[in-house]
């Protein structure tokens, strides 16, 4: 009996340690070794790729730059309002993310249209109204096609102009970005299970020490 209780106590302590272990999300994207001097010693550190400066306009005709996201965790995706296939599914799923974090001022969602000719600011506003989103939690971004397609590469996303069938092509991922503008996760936007994981990972990311300190 004594050995049984000892075993139970050890198992309880082990599980308690496991439950208190903080999970850290990986940092994705390109990385570069950087050599620098610390306390008189030469050390090699890793510098991860970050989202570069940008300038777009949201559905309220407000200018949005990378500085608008300083100190914020955010999720990005690419879409167009006339998309007949994956975009409606993606944004129905994104509504779950929006509803979960809409009261958190340190969180944003940004959706880049890849069809700026049709998706003007008024069109984006109507699209937002139809989705039922308001306020500054979720921005639908309009910009020059070249600028949008260029920044998509920074998110490791593939977008292209109309194919022979008259369709735009783009990846359907949601990309999680931390407060240092580093890529921390990619999630299939049409898969509810993946979106549930995204919500959990956002909560995990918010608890990371450098994300708390970056507020």
Image (spheres, rainbow, N blue to C red):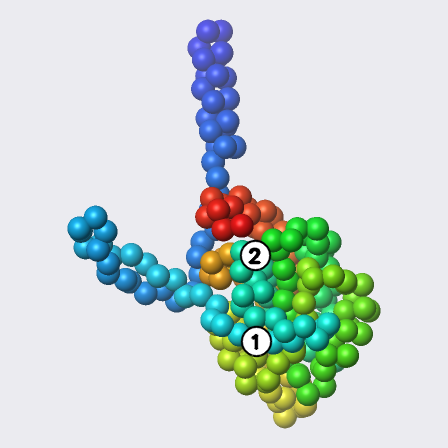
User: Along the horizontal axis of the image, is 69 left or right of 83?
Assistant: left
Q: How far across and down, in percent of the image, does residue 207 sit?
A: 53, 44
How crowded pointer 2 is (Cα within 10 Å; few <14, some 14-19, many 20+) is rated as: many
Q: Residue at x 32, y 65 (%)?
A: 32
User: Along the horizontal axis of the image, is 37 left or right of 106?
Assistant: left
Q: State the separation of the CA atoms marked 1 and 2.
A: 17 Å
Residue 76 visible in rendering: yes
Which one is earlier in the sequence, the residue at label 1 or at label 2? 1
Q: How far across and down, in percent of the image, does residue 35 sit?
A: 24, 60
Q: How far across and down, in percent of the image, does residue 168 sit?
A: 64, 83
Query: Of the numbered discs in the image, which one, if any, rests on residue 72?
Result: 2
Q: Is residue 36 above or below residue 10?
A: below
Would you identify the image quadrant in which residue 165 lies?
bottom right
Report the front residue among 174 and 48. Answer: 48
Residue 85 visible in rendering: no
Q: How far across and down, in percent of the image, does residue 11 sit?
A: 48, 22
Q: Is residue 138 above or below residue 2?
A: below
Q: What is the secondary structure assignment of the residue under circle 1?
A: strand
Q: Residue furthest bottom?
A: 164
Q: Residue at x 62, y 89 (%)?
A: 163
Q: Residue furthest top?
A: 2
Q: Is residue 93 above or below residue 165?
A: above
Query: Of the numbered discs in the image, which one, if any, rests on residue 204?
Result: none
Q: Are marks 1 and 2 in contact (CB under 8 Å)?
A: no
How crowded pointer 1 is (Cα within 10 Å; few <14, some 14-19, many 20+) is rated as: some
Q: What is the secondary structure assignment of the residue under circle 2?
A: loop
User: Along the horizontal axis of the image, is 33 left or right of 69?
Assistant: left
* Residue behind mark 1: 55
Report the front residue among 175 and 103. Answer: 103
Q: Residue at x 71, y 82 (%)?
A: 119
């Amino acid at each position: 009996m004594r050995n049984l209780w000892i075993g139970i106590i050890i198992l309880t302590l082990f599980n308690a340690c496991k439950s208190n272990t903080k999970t850290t999300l990986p940092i994705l994207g390109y990385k570069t070794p950087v050599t620098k001097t610390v306390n008189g010693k030469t050390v090699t550190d890793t510098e991860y790729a970050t989202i570069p400066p940008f300038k777009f306009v949201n559905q309220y005709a407000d200018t949005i730059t990378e500085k608008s996201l300083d100190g914020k965790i955010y999720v990005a995706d690419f879409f167009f309002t006339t998309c007949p296939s994956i975009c409606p599914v993606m944004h129905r799923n994104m509504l779950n993310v929006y509803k979960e974090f809409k009261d958190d001022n340190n969180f944003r969602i940004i959706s880049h249209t890849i069809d700026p000719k049709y998706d003007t600011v008024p069109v984006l506003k109507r699209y937002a109204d139809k989705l039922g989103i308001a306020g500054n939690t979720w921005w639908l971004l309009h910009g020059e096609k070249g600028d949008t397609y260029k920044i998509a590469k920074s998110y490791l996303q593939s977008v292209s102009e109309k194919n022979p069938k008259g369709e735009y092509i783009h990846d359907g991922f949601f990309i999680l970005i931390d407060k240092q503008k580093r890529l921390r996760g990619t999630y299939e936007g049409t898969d509810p299970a993946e979106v549930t994981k995204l919500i959990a990972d956002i909560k995990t990311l918010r608890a990371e020490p450098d994300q708390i300190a970056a507020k």
